[in-house]
Every structure is written in C-alpha cells, then in structure tokens.
Image (spheres, grey):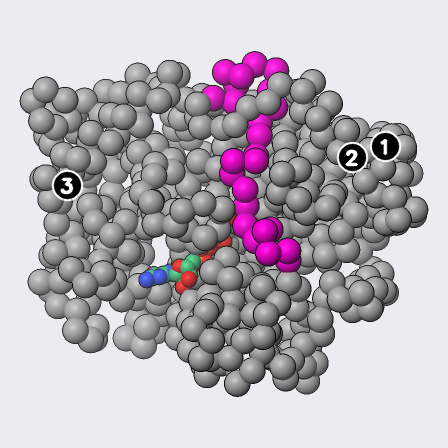
C-alpha cells in the first residue's frame, strides 16, 4: 500500500467519519455489487435489459443538473494567479469553510477510494488521481470515464505524486455547494453536488483546471478539445484537435459519419472532450485523450445526427436525467424517434408526449465506454498519442463568425482562440444563449490567470518546431427565421476537408482582415439539398458592421485582462484599424 495515499485517506476519514471505507479495484464483481446496491435504494433504475444490456437510469437532484460556474473556485495563494476570469478564494479560507462542511459528512455512508489514471497505460502523458467520494454513482461513472483501480496504483507505485480529490455530495444543497481547486497543492475539494463536471473529479477539475497548471510549468497543454483522425482515400490519417465550448459539438464532430457522397473518407475518434498535448521528439505537437469514456449530451443525439454515439450507448451506459419510459426505455428531445406513450421526466414527474414540457433535461447525458464507439481510433490508447496537424477553434454564433477561416500563423491563431465567443448553453447553470468570450473554450476550465495562459500558448508556439495550423469554424449561423443555415453534423466533413487541404498545401485561400477565407469553389457542397453556392458565400461573408461591433467587444474583453500579452493587443489594434470606428 502506497503510504502517502494511505495517510491521506486516514486523515480524510478522520474528518468525514464514514461507516465504512471501500478501496476501489475496478473489478467486475465490485461493479456488480455497486449496481445492485444502487438498484436497491433507487440511485439507479435498470432499463429494459434485453433492449439496453448493462444500461441504467439515474435522476440527479432537480437543483443539481449542470456545472456551477459561480460556485467554482481557484484557491491559489495570490488572487492574481486565479486571474480575472476565475472566482478566487484564499486557500486557508476554502480549507476552513469546506473543512467545516466535511466534518462528519459521511456518517452513515460508505467512503469509496477511487485510484484513477488519466491517460493511457504506460504513457509519459499519464497522471494519477485519487478521488474519495461518498457517491456510488460517482464510482460507477468514474469507472467508465477513467482507468480506475489497480492500473492506477501500479502507475503510481510508491510515489506521492497524485492529485487528491475529495468529494462529498453532502445534502445536495446548492447553498452549501463548492467546487474548489488548490493548484499549488494538486488538490480538489468538491462539496454538495453529485453531477458531472462537479463530481467526476478526473474530468474538468483535474484534467483541465489542475492539469492546465501542470502543463504551464511542464511545457504542455491541457485543453478542452476533441481529437479525431481524418482518413483520406489513400488511407492516410491526419489528426485534428478542436476546442468548442460545452455543448457546442465536440462529441458530434469527433464521431462524424461522412455523408454518402464523401464515403471514401473516414473519421476516427480519439477523444471527445479533453486533449493533453506535448511536443514530440519529431518537433510536432502530440495529443492523448486522458479519458476512457464519453460523458455526452443526450438531446439532439439521433441516428441521423450522431449514429456512432447511439451505437456507443447501446450497452453498459448510464443515462442521467433523460426521459424514462414506463417500459424501461429512454428518450430525449431530438432523438428522432417517437417518445414512449407514458414515462417519467427528468424531474421525476409523470410525463406524456402531450405534457407540453421537456422529457429530458437539456443537459441530460450518457456515460459510455470509449472502446464501444464504432469509430474509435486504433491509436486512441497509444501511449505516445497522435500527431496533431490542425487545431480548430469554434463557437456557437448565430451571426458574425464565418463558417471557417484559417489564422495567418500560430501567434494569430492564439489571438483567434483568445477572442473566440459563443452563446451559453445548458451545460452550466445560468442563462442560455448569451454571447460571451470563451477563450479556447476554456473560460470555465483554465485553472490560472488567463493572461498567463495566453502567454503560455504563445510560448509553446515558439517551442514547437512544426506547429499545427490553427483554424476557426462556426456551424451555427442562423437565417432570419433563426434556422441553422449550415447543415452541420456529417456535412461538417466538407469543412474538415478544406482544413486538410490547407494543411497539405493543396488549395489556395483569400486573405481577409480576420484570416484566410476559403474560395467558395474549394468547399464541396455537392449533393446538399437546398444549400446553394449563394448560401455558402453568405456563410463566408465578413460583415463590416457586425465585425465593428465584434472588435469593440474584443476591446472590452481584453480590458478585463491586466496580464494580456502585448502580441495579442497588437493583433487587436490591426483588426481595429480595419473594422473599428475611428475613436474606438
Ligand atoms: P460537452 O460535452 O458539453 O463539452 O459538449 P460537446 O461540445 O461535446 O457538444 P455535443 O457534440 O454534445 O453537441 C451539443 C449539442 O449541439 C447537441 O444537441 C448536438 O446535437 C448539437 N450539435 C452538434 N453538432 C452540431 C452541428 O454541426 N450543427 C448543429 N446545428 N447542431 C450541432
Ligand atoms: C462540459 O460541460 O464541458 C462537459 C460536461 O463536458 S461536464 O462534465 O459536466 O463538465
Ligand atoms: Mn466538455
């Protein structure tokens, strides 16, 4: 037994006073036992096991259905190190405040100790975390999302180098809910939530907030990015990493199925949410997916939009806050099938198709093993990762941002990422549909000063001899009736193919003030119903007036960042000369 782990677990148990301590090994029989306990007390409901083998339903508390950004804190000694975009609490204050809440919080409960490995086995990228939790749901989800148990203890050996994650659901009271990160102690304390990114500490808390801190000091990048391999007609695979904010299309793009007309191409899924990227010996940027499963958005997932996600979730999957049919089926809005005649909605209320309310919560999710994905890449567990040729940033923008453009170079690409914006979604508590800056899709996940983070990106650019090219996409432009103009989903391949051609130097582009724009003839729109060359030209349009407004908003955004690197400010000034009003 690792002595550092043992000492910490003892110390936590002394505070939280569980009835019992269970060390998670990751075995099948342990999983069965936990499932049975959950079934007995209603924490899980079994689905129809003929139609959904190994699948379970979970309903979280009504007030606990998404990440809580206003209750998420970076607890560095200096407030400046948390920066202008994070909530900050002094470490001593956070330890004291949460320490009170943890006192005796596991009385009458079992404390589970989950060792987990983020990253493939035997990989130089990989890191160990230990999550202590009083939630069986968390254990069962972590079991899918990370490599848990013995494999993690083997990787750790006698080392004390692990991320300490302490989680208690408490009473699920949002007035006593805190998600605190102590980057200087590699520690996470989460209290009062049992949901997703608040409670599965390997994901956003470790793999992004803590890992971004580690990456900053160890010369690597921890990013909110999917990773995919795009195989061309000759069988050559090019890897792309893409950062879109929460609920803006990462899972969908990572599992893309080509439209009929482009079926000679193939997309391989390496990861759908997080990428850890290091400079390889060959001078390229290499990426691994630190996770082992998908915690994906259910609504909108259909046979048409994302068949691979549906197939992935056909077995051994936990569904959270979707609609539960009386017949042990599941359903959500946008599934593309008839809803059951009668069921129970995400709130636990009786539901029929004529109820007039949502059956599934907009942030309802599935937790499914990555290895079950039909498009999973043969390289997804490669300890060395995969070499990234293109980085793509993207947001959900009804207006302004064109379908796709390419940055002039790495530095400009950092500007494009630093200034990207997106409409808020149901993945976090708060108003949906409000445009906000979400740099590199990391606004809620960057665990340190965002100005330092931009500088780290700029510094990395100098250290990567052969850096990926950087692009920006927007699948979400709408027409005057609020309808999406671009068909999206599988057809996004048409945009990826332009990106691929640019990476290979096979097509030209038009220089614009915001970057290189495609020549309309270089994006294949053959076979698209009702989408014309005119529609494409409209989607590539840079409207001077709305970009004038955009530049003004970028100015206000940058004014919030005292440590903004000068390189980024320079790029703003260039853009302002093109679009700004003379006095702005
Ligand atoms: P997180 O797991 O929260 O990080 O989300 P994500 O970025 O993985 O988003 P996901 O792929 O789950 O998509 C979120 C929502 O956007 C779903 O309802 C999708 O159906 C929808 N969506 C994804 N891609 C497209 C697209 O190309 N066009 C349109 N119109 N909607 C899309
Ligand atoms: C996101 O919100 O970006 C997610 C879901 O991927 S959660 O795990 O809740 O963060
Ligand atoms: Mn995400």
> x, y percentage for residue 138?
71, 52
Q: Residue 77 lies in magenta, yes or no?
A: yes
> What residue is drawn where x is 39% and y is 75%?
304
Q: Is residue 379 above or below residue 116?
A: below
Find numbered disc 2 in the image and state the secondary structure of the residue it sits on: helix
Q: CA distance from mark 2 to mark 3?
A: 50 Å
Mark before the other along the chain sequence, 3 or 1: 1
Task: Work out which quarter of the rendered image holds the C terminus and state it.
Answer: top left
Residue carrying label 2? 102
Taking depth in this image into account, of 208 and 506 the one nearest to the observer is 208
Q: Secondary structure at mark 3?
A: helix
Read off the magenta span: 60-83
Camera-side residue of 117 and 6: 6
Within 10 angstroms of label 3, few (less than 14), some, or many (20 or more) residues?
some
Q: How far apart are labels 3 and 1 at the CA level?
A: 55 Å
Picture layout, residue 49 above or below residue 535 = below
Disc 1 target residue: 15
Q: Is mark 1 within 8 Å of ligand 2?
A: no
Q: Which residue is mark 3?
A: 546
The residues tagged by marks 2 and 1 sit, at their Cα atoms, a distance apart of: 7 Å
557 horizontally vs 481: left or right? right
């Amino acid at each position: 037994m690792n002595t550092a782990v043992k000492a910490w677990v003892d110390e936590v148990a002394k505070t939280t006073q569980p009835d019992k301590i269970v060390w998670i090994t990751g075995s099948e029989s342990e999983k069965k036992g936990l499932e049975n306990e959950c079934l007995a007390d209603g924490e899980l409901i079994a689905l129809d096991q003929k139609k959904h083998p190994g699948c379970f339903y979970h309903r979280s508390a009504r007030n606990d259905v998404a990440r809580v950004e206003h209750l998420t804190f970076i607890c560095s000694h200096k407030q400046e190190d948390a920066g202008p975009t994070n909530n900050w609490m002094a470490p001593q204050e956070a330890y004291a405040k949460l320490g009170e809440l943890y006192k005796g919080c596991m009385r009458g409960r079992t404390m589970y100790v989950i060792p987990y490995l983020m990253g493939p086995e035997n990989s130089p990228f990989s890191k160990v975390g230990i999550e202590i939790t009083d939630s069986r749901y968390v254990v069962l989800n972590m079991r899918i999302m990370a490599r848990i148990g013995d494999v993690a203890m083997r990787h750790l050996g006698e080392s004390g180098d692990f991320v300490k994650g302490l989680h208690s659901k408490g009473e699920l009271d949002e007035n006593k809910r805190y998600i605190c990160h102590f980057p200087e102690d590699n520690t996470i304390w989460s209290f009062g939530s049992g949901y997703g990114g608040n409670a599965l500490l390997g994901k956003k808390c470790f793999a992004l907030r803590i890992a971004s801190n580690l990456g900053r000091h160890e010369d690597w990048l921890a990013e909110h990015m999917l990773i995919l391999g795009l195989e061309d007609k000759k069988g050559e695979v090019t890897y792309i990493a893409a950062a879109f904010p929460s609920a803006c299309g990462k899972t969908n793009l990572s599992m893309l199925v080509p439209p009929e007309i482009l079926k000679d191409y193939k997309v391989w899924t390496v990861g759908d949410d997080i990428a850890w990227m290091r400079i390889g010996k060959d001078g390229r940027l290499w990426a691994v997916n630190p996770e082992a499963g998908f915690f994906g958005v259910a609504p909108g997932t259909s046979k048409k939009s994302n068949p691979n996600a549906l197939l992935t979730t056909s077995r051994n999957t936990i569904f959270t806050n979707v609609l539960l049919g009386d017949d042990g089926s599941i359903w959500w809005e946008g599934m593309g099938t008839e809803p059951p005649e009668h069921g129970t909605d995400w709130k636990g209320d009786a539901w029929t198709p004529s109820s007039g309310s949502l059956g599934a919560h907009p942030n309802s999710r599935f937790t499914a093993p990555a290895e079950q994905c039909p498009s999973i890449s043969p390289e997804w567990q490669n300890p060395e990762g995969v070499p990234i040729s293109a980085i793509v940033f993207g947001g959900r923008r009804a207006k302004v941002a064109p379908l796709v453009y390419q940055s002039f170079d790495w530095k400009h690409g950092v500007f494009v990422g630093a200034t990207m914006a997106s409409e808020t979604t149901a993945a976090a508590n708060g108003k949906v549909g409000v445009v906000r800056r979400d740099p590199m899709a990391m606004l809620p996940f960057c665990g340190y000063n965002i100005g330092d983070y931009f500088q780290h990106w700029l510094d990395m650019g100098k250290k990567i001899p052969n850096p990926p090219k950087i692009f920006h996409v927007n699948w979400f432009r709408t027409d005057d009736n609020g309808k999406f103009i671009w068909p999206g989903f599988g057809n996004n391949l048409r945009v990826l193919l332009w990106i691929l051609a640019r990476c290979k130097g096979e097509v030209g582009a038009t220089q614009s003030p915001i970057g290189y724009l495609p020549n309309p003839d270089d994006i294949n729109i053959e076979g698209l119903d009702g989408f014309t060359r005119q529609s494409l030209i409209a989607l590539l349009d840079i409207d001077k007036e709305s970009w004038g407004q955009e530049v003004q908003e970028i100015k206000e955004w940058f004014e919030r960042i005292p440590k903004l690197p000068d390189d980024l400010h320079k790029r703003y000034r260039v853009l302002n000369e093109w679009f700004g009003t003379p006095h702005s």
